Amino acid sequence: MSFKKSPYKNRFPHKTREHCHEKNLLALVVSSSLLLSACSDHSSTSSSAPTADATAPGAPGNSSVWAYAGKTGIGTSFEQYTNSAYSDSGASGIVSKVWFSIAQGVLTETMYGLIHEAQLQEMQFFIKGHDFLDEEKKDTISTIEYLKTDARGRPQSLAYKIVNKDKDGKYEIEKHIFTDPDSQSLMMRVVFRAFADGITPYVYVNPAIANTGSNDSASFSNGVWTATDGNSSMSLKTSAAVVQSTVGFEGVSDGISEVKQTGALTNIYSTTGASKGNVAFTLQMPAVKNGESAQWDLALGFGKNPTESAAAAEKTLTTGYEKVLAHYNGDGDAIGWQDFLQSLPALEKLSATATDGGKLLYTSAMVLKAQEDKTHAGAFIASLSNPWGDTKSAEKSATGYKAVWPRDFYQVAMAMLALGDTESPRIAFEYLQQVQASEKIAGYSGTPGWFLQKTHVDGEPEWVGVQLDQTGMPLMLGWRLWKEGILSDAEISSWYQKMLKPAADFLVNGGAVKIMWNDTTIKPPYTQQERWEEQQGYSPSTTAAIIAGLVSAADIATQAGDAEGAKKYLAAADKYSSELEARTYTTAGSLTGEQGNGNYYLRINANEDPNDKGALDTRNAQTVGDESQVIDGGFLELVRYGVRAANDAKILETLPEYDNLKLPDLLRTKYEFTFAGVEGMFPGWRRYGIDGYGEDLITGLGYVEANNSTQGRGRVWPFFTGERGHFELQLAKTDSNVDIEKLRNTYVKAMELFANEGMMLPEQVWDGVGSNAAYNYQIGEGTNGATPLAWTHAEYVKLLRSYSDGKVWDRNASTEARYVK
């Protein structure tokens, strides 16, 4: 029995500090039990003796890939901050740094260490019968639910119950998945039910140690299956009486390959020897008789070496399912996910605004918090997934979306603030100094102040394009934290000097930039990349963030006693605002006749003339010879941040083109969806016309596999439904006849309907255009892009807050006062 206590008496007053003494005593007991683990081996393994050649052949095995990215669940233990950081030395004890994901009914990428460091690609069952061998993720019908919900069905932790039923009714697999807050490990309870004779389950584990899938070695000894790569190790232990097992190279000597060919596991290997590659474990579990069931606990432990990882797994099995789950949930005196939820004062109010009673809201709150690294507190990533991962090579380390983008980061911090969380947004803001360009960034020279495009959570640069909205947003975030009283006058003045002033100066002056491939000079508001990271020029959405950022900076400069700075920032913001339409609004656009009237905001303009129909850069294999053919929703950000009124003539003039259902599919952005059993049509929008970031129109293959096909097509992104919902709320303030309830039941409800069965909100959903042969998506279903996308969950939370408050949550009051008359 082991629990964590809060180091803050006021944070969770219903949890008692007296329990800390109990934990210390119990920790000694657990430590002692580990010394005796050889006498109490939970694996109870009776594996058959290895063959004469116990070293598996076939290195390196099949080429490795990542897993399906459409996650139906993610999870990790909730941990508390100790002095604005995560620390094993705090009163809460060990910080669990294990994250997992679920897709297609099976455990997929599981991370340990830093949040992007995958150690497992996949763990699933193969099921053998008299005349079949099923693969769990392909041959069953899967359902997922939360292990603990409140009386209204709202999830209370990120612990899952998955039930995978054979399509022919021969067996059923129930799995409970969560991590151990007191160990670097994951627990899975399996209840296997047989409804036919001759059913034999096999557990199949494909490690991907140290965030690569093809440099691993594997071994089995004393009831422990272990994979290693350098200074990273993963060990599997189980309570099951395993019949026999083997380790080997995936697709060659992994055991399952043999079962597929011969129907039996006869060649048993205990090690992959000195060879390295894409390794796997196969465990033959006891046969389950018709009408009976079996229950097994499995634990995956992680560490720097096999001793550490095996001890982590053993500790979890010793603690046991009930106690580990109770701590994970936060039952009794334990601090867990329920305590996090109870610390969010806005949850009940926002639940009343939701149309599902708060189920997606509670999920979103936990999903956002779960996507924070626990070595670098405040480092919130974009998604715990790798888009189209099951077709993306894992031969080399890659973060996918498990990285920091300041733009996505801003959305998350503002959503956490909307929930009433005052700690996470503040610590996130303080983290941003790690990803700001300066002499402290290895390999950087040039003008300081802008924020790096994409970094690892430890601040290591990965992508280095200059996106000026990602420099405006930290200024807006700091301003908001100050206005909400989370940062004091003295604190915001201090942050002005060390982080915000250089950012604001860069938005005024720009300057030379040199890092990795990027050697350029930036002249704001011309941005090297806009919010879709693909085009250079003058962008309405980028300019909106720049202007709001500079107005925020002026307020902060005034507070810090820098009157000249404040004057400079406002002058630049005014100039950018006055020139906005001349640079980004066309009066001679190509969308005419049924397509429009030629007057609208462009997605982006590559030069000073929005009427010249200039070419854009080729991106995602899509060639754009006329920038005025491309519409996107970026102009709505001008309203969101207070740069333009919702009823501004040019804003309203752009809506018909943006919403035009008669545009050819190549150019069209808006689509409408229906959902079974739900009355009404629900709107969704693509990023922009001529978007190639998605499935291939002809083959149906995903973006990675199609390899930048000229027929690639980006799909509908659900968070645009939220963006439009925010705009419509603001526009309603100009018309007292607008039915706010109707708006809520359109935009809030649509986002809820876009969530999958695990209530994960995706990056993109299938909109029914083109071939569906590769994936067989349902209309409105999340694709194999990133799910859950933090930005989408954040947009949903903020939409609820906006409708609850009756005003747009992101709206910058100082900016609105200056430009909306």
Image: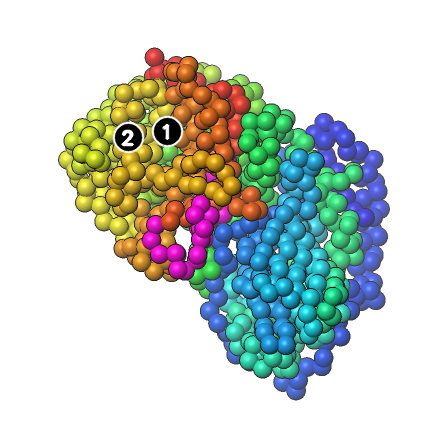
Q: Residue at x 84, y 42 (%)?
A: 22
Magenta stretch secondary structure, dominant: loop
Q: Residue at x 43, y 48 (%)?
A: 779
Report if residue 752 is visible in the image. Answer: yes
- Residue 270 position, x and y percent, is 65, 76
Quadrant occupied by the C terminus: top left
User: Circle 2 sits in a helix, a strand or a loop, which is it?
Assistant: helix
- Residue 223 position, x and y percent, is 73, 69
Quickly name the residue at label 1.
Answer: 637
- Between 389 and 534, the residue placed more toward the observer is 389
Q: Residue furthest bottom?
A: 52
Pair 2/1: label in front = 2
In the displayed structure, 807 sits above or below 322; it is: above
In the displayed structure image, the side of residue 787 where residue 295 appears, left or right:
right
Label 1 neighbour load within 10 Å: few <14, some 14-19, many 20+? many
Q: Residue at x 62, y 60 (%)?
A: 165
Query: Hey, what amino acid is under mark 1?
Result: Glu
Query: Which quadrant holds residue 17?
Result: top right
Q: Is residue 778 magenta?
A: yes
Query: Hey, what amino acid is under mark 2?
Result: Pro
**In the rendering, which numbered label is found on residue 656?**
2
Marks 2 and 1 sit apart, C-alpha to C-alpha, by 17 Å
What stretch of residues is rendered in magenta?
Answer: 769-794
What's the image's color scheme? rainbow
In the displayed structure image, the side of residue 38 where residue 471 appears, left or right:
left
- Between 516 and 223, the residue placed more toward the observer is 223
- Residue 772 position, x and y percent, is 39, 56
Label 2 neighbour load within 10 Å: few <14, some 14-19, many 20+? some
